[in-house]
Image (cartoon, rainbow, N blue to C red):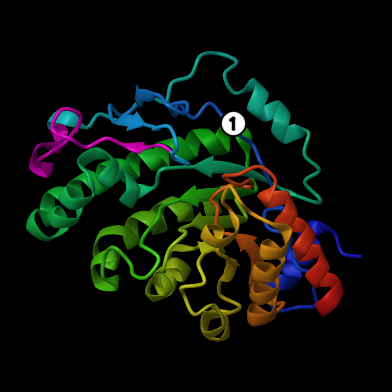
């Protein structure tokens, strides 16, 4: 029987895996990293490390920035230098100790020590100024947007340096949602103009400093951006929704990138979830997308679920499909 890492590599290289990869099983997420991220509790509100107000209303499954006139940090991108200040990366002595200990406890022969980075570059633009303002600014103020993205990129590179020096991760899980369920937020040409070179720098830095796996999360439609993902160094696109034509992407790009997702969280991850519902969705996903260059997974951007038990129940059904199809 192959180890978890060996089996993943067989999937990614078109070899002979002996089972489906079970969602995030190959990554040991080190969540004790002193990232500086300030997050609200359910029902709460905080001002994060960038000065962005983040609110998590009761009854919602996640937190999101607040962009009304009272709370928006940046309403004119041409004035970004006045309002956008990167948080300090200085940490008190011993701040990394717990993360280093957690990483050292991982069996690296079997799992990848993984660091989590969020929000990504595109997400940061709309965190700072709101989605409509951000999208309009790509058209109306491209020069200022390039400057802002360069600034955000440098911060990411500085953070990556600290992460590599202290944690020595084998993998990163990097968030940046690039679309809705049915379309990308930017055209491929505009995405390439504003983000490709920045991500080549960031992911290139990680690859040059011992990070073997770049896992990029975007639970969206982004099929038209796959060539860019490959060019920027993404190994696994995590969160790929079934609104993409996953079998066609596997056929076209398999061997250059691996697709992780296909199990629609909106279908399985809700208060009235059932094992039968999850079983049907997992079965469809595994049968449609096959054994190579594909990892069946919910589209959630971390190992877990919005409602208790869903993630574990999904693992059970992936195991059942291994017995049926391998």
Residue under label 1 = 166
Q: Residue 322: x, y in percent?
A: 81, 71
Q: Is residue 72 toward the left or the right of residue 33 in the image? A: left
Specify the segment rendered in magenta.
Answer: 63-81
In the rendered picture of this protein, how many numbered marks are placed on residues?
A: 1
Point 66% across, 64% down: residue: 277
Position of 22 relative to 40 (above/below): below
Point 13% across, 56% down: residue: 136
Q: Is residue 48 toward the left or the right of residue 326 in the image? A: left
Position of 273 relative to 258 (above/below): above
Q: Residue furthest top?
A: 93
Q: For the N terminus, which image quadrant? A: bottom right
Can residue 223 be seen here? The reply is yes
Q: Nearer the viewer, residue 163 or 47?
A: 47
Magenta span main SS:
loop
Q: Counting other residues with Cα less than 10 Å from the Cα at mark 1, is it few (<14), some (14-19), or many (20 or more)?
A: some
Q: Residue 309: x, y in percent?
A: 70, 46
């Amino acid at each position: 029987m192959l180890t978890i890492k060996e089996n993943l590599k067989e999937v990614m290289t078109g070899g002979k895996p002996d089972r489906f990869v079970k969602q995030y099983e190959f990554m040991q997420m080190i969540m004790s990293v002193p990232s500086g991220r300030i997050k609200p509790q359910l029902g709460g509100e905080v001002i994060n490390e960038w000065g962005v107000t983040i609110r998590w209303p009761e009854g919602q499954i996640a937190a999101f920035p607040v962009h009304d006139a009272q709370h928006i940090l940046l309403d004119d991108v041409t004035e970004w230098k006045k309002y956008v200040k990167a948080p300090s990366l200085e940490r008190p002595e011993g701040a990394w100790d717990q993360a280093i200990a957690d990483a050292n406890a991982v069996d690296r022969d079997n799992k990848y020590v993984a660091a989590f980075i969020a929000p990504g570059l595109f997400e940061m633009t709309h965190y700072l100024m709101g989605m409509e303002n951000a999208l309009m600014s790509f058209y109306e103020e491209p020069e200022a947007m390039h400057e802002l993205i360069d600034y955000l990129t440098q911060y990411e590179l500085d953070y990556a340096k600290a992460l590599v020096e202290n944690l020595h991760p084998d993998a990163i899980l990097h968030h940046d949602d690039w679309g809705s369920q049915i379309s990308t937020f930017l055209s491929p040409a505009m995405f390439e103009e504003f983000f490709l070179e920045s991500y080549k720098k960031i992911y290139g830095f990680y690859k040059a400093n011992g990070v073997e796996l770049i896992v990029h999360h975007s639970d969206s439609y982004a099929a038209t951006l796959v060539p860019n993902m490959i060019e920027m160094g993404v190994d696994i696109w995590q969160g790929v929704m079934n609104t993409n034509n996953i079998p066609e992407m596997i056929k076209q790009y398999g061997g250059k990138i691996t697709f992780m997702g296909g199990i629609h969280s909106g279908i399985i991850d809700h208060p009235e979830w059932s094992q039968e519902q999850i079983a049907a969705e997992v079965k469809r996903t595994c049968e449609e997308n096959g054994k190579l260059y594909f990892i069946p997974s919910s589209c959630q951007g971390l190992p877990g679920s919005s409602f208790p038990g869903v993630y574990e129940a999904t693992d059970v059904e992936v195991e059942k499909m291994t017995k049926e199809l391998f």
